[in-house]
Structure formats: structure tokens, C-alpha cells
Image: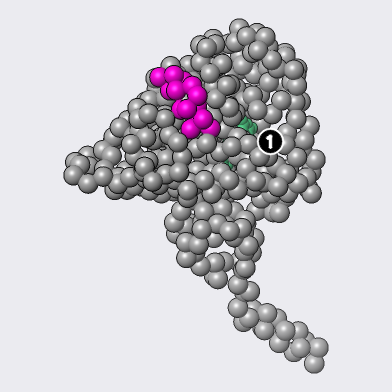
Amino acid sequence: MLSSLLVLSLLSSVLQPALAVTIDTEGLPDTGLDTSSWTAGVLPPLEDIWDLNDMQIAAKNVLSGKYYASYRTAALNEYTYQANLGIYSKVRLNGFGFRDVSNLQTSTTILGYNFSQPFFIAPAANAGHANKTAEKSLASAAGKAGILYVPSISSTLSIETIAKAGVKGQVMFHQEYIWSNTSQVIDELDRIKAAGFKAIFLTVDNTGINGIRTRSMRYTDGSETGHSANFDLNSLAAFRNLTTLPIVPKGIKTWQDAKTCLELGFPAIYVSNHGGRVLDGVPTAVEILMDIRKNAPEVFAGMEVYADGGVRRGTDALILLALGARAVGLGRPPMFANIWGEEGVSRLISLFAQEMATSMQLMGVADVSQLNTSYHSDALAWSLGPNT
Ligand SMILES: Cc1cc2nc3c(=O)[nH]c(=O)nc-3n(C[C@H](O)[C@H](O)[C@H](O)COP(=O)(O)O)c2cc1C
């Protein structure tokens, strides 16, 4: 009797369809993604994935609450995080007819190195939370697609392991923090150069402390950083003597700091609010680029400008490029794509490249180097600077 009851209950659990997963999609655009065949905690098929938002929802389905929160989290009320995502919907792009767009050109140079696309994988810590291949899959997918990858100094894998993971001849830059322990900085800069990285993205926006990130603090306290809190212009000058690699200050959020970097002779700046993870309430990359255009337009002629924050669609990247950015970073999306390892990151790169190319063609832009503010509609409520 007991055994037949057991068999019955086993049978019914096998025959019962798995409960459809319901995922809170956090207000991300509805792309018609159907998750009804997904199982909670199980990697969904990559064929279900058609854009970067889908990848985030898939990551939410498969990662632990703690690891998903560590990628997704942002500071305080996440106003800046939300503004990063929302700002692109407020910008109107012009689509010109009567142009020859039969031969599209997306390749560009970043600090003089050739890349196939004007977008890159931004530094993000702990890729190992998504996949055991960690930063290796990001490096190899970027290398195979010919795009730039800039690993974080807080990566899961070592500087040397990541350097070796790329394809032959691949150019990568490396991110560095301003640790209060100067000998650690010197050691890391030496190792980064010896491993073959060609430039340093020096993150200057979390001066001794991270933003308060409630979503991830529920799992772990992450506000202490070990970064220097007294990194002033004298420290910046001293830092520049520690390496011969070009240095790009990352985390520029005001036109005044952009202008200072130009005056100090940096080859480039990286406009970023750290994906809304540091100071909540600061402007988005669109707004910062517009502030620079208005108050210090010489910055765009005197140095390269990179930008990131909330870029999820090819059109988002085109908006930043048209405002004067030379290249655009993706932070969270590659981390989410890495739940499938290299295959996922490669799919992200090709989906994003396709969105960009399609939109360029529809805008009447044959070459990314032609993008300028004339591609923003006059109907825009923003006060853009003169066309470049
Ligand atoms: C999980 C995660 C870790 C990050 N780690 C770093 C880091 O170690 N160094 C750094 O300069 N920026 C770091 N960032 C910021 C990114 O480089 C980038 O500025 C930001 O994510 C862009 O916004 P997006 O995620 O909306 O694309 C991190 C961002 C995320 C999401």
C-alpha cells in the first residue's frame, strides 16, 4: 500500500508540468520574451535571447539572489541608474534619406588602436559570479569580434591570466583603482604593462568609498573600498609618473573635470557615473556630454572622449557617439551575457553590432566617424552646442 502511494506521488511529480517561472522584469522594455518554458535556476536556451534586456532577465533567472544583486545593484534610490536607462528615450535621432548607405563602416580607432566597433566591454568586477570561465570568456569573445575589452582590477582572474585568454595580437586596456596602498598600485601597474595591456583606465569616481548599494548590502557590506580618499591633483600628477602607459581618467561627471583633464594633457577621458553605483543623483552620460559641449567644447577637439551608462541598444550608442563620444562602454550587459560563457558574450556583441549597423543605415550614416549633433533632431528640448 505504502509503496503504491509512493509510486503514485512520484509519478504525479514527474507528470506535473514544471511551474512556469515568473520573473520581475523591473520595468525593462517588453520585447515579447516568453519565459513560460524556463525553469527557475536553469540556464535558458541562448536561442530565446534577442537583445541585451533578454540577457538581463535570463541572468536574473539563473544567478543566485546574491550574485544577481551584485551586478544589478546601484546607489541609494537608484535615480541615476534609472535615469541612465531612461535618458535615451528622450533623445530623438534624425533619419536622413538620399544618402548612400550601401557600404557601412563601423570600425574605429581608440587611442590609435584599430577596433571593429565603437563599443567596448567596460571594466566590471567579479565576472566569475556568472560563469567559471570568468573574464576569459569576455576576453576571447571580444578578441574574436575585434572589439576592446578593459578588465577590472577587481576581476576574478589575475591580470596575467586574462592577458593570455585573448586571441593573438588582441589589444586590451586595463582598469586600475587608486588604492591607498601605493606599493600595490605600483606592483599592479608594472604587471599590467608587462602582461601587454596598452593603456590604463584610471577610475577616479569612488574616492575611498563606494556608493551605498542597498540591494547588494542585504547580502554583503561593500562600501569599504581600500581606495585613497585624498587623491587630489598633486596625487594625480604623482600617479602619472608611475607608468609609461597612457592614462584615461574614468568617472568624469562634470565639464569642469573634463576641462582639467584636457589642460593636464590626458589623451582621453571616460565620461561615466559608474552605472549609477557611486553618487546617486548625478547626471547621465547624455547630459554630461551636453554640458561639456556647452561649457568646454574644446575638449572634443583636444582629446578622445568615451562614455557609458545604461547603453542597451544600438541606438543608445549612436546617441552618445553623435554627442561626441568616440567609443561607448557596456558594463552590466556583458556580465549578464557571460552566464552562457563566451557564446553568450559573442551573441551579445553580434546582436548589439547588428542593432547599431541597422540604425546607422536607417539614419543615413555610412561611417561612424560621420556621426555628429546634426543627427539629433531639432525637436529635441536640449540646448546642444554647435554642430561638429
Ligand atoms: C558589477 C559591476 C562591477 C563594476 N566594477 C567596476 C570596476 O571594477 N571598475 C570600474 O572602473 N568600474 C566598474 N563598474 C562600472 C562599469 O565600468 C561601467 O561604468 C558601468 O557599469 C556602465 O553602466 P551600465 O552597467 O549601465 O552599462 C562596474 C559595474 C558593474 C555593473
Q: Amino acid at mark 1?
A: Leu
**Vertical arrangement, residue 230 with respect to residue 53, above or below:** above
The picture quadrant for ligand 1 comes to top right
Of residues 198 and 329, the one drawn nearer to the viewer in this rendering: 329
Q: Quadrant of the C terminus?
A: top left
**What is the span of residues highlighted in magenta in the rendered image?**
288-301
- Asked if ligand 1 lies within 8 A of label 1, the reply is no
The residue drawn where x is 36% and y is 42% is 378
How many marks can you see? 1
**Vertical arrangement, residue 96 with respect to residue 154, above or below:** below
| Residue 31, visible in the rendered structure | yes
Q: Position of residue 119 (x, y in %)?
A: 44, 36
The residue drawn where x is 80% and y is 40% is 221
Q: Secondary structure at mark 1?
A: loop
- Asked if the magenta segment contains residue 293, the reply would be yes
The residue drawn where x is 66% and y is 31% is 154
Q: Quadrant of residue 64?
A: bottom right
Q: Position of residue 184 (x, y in %)?
A: 71, 17
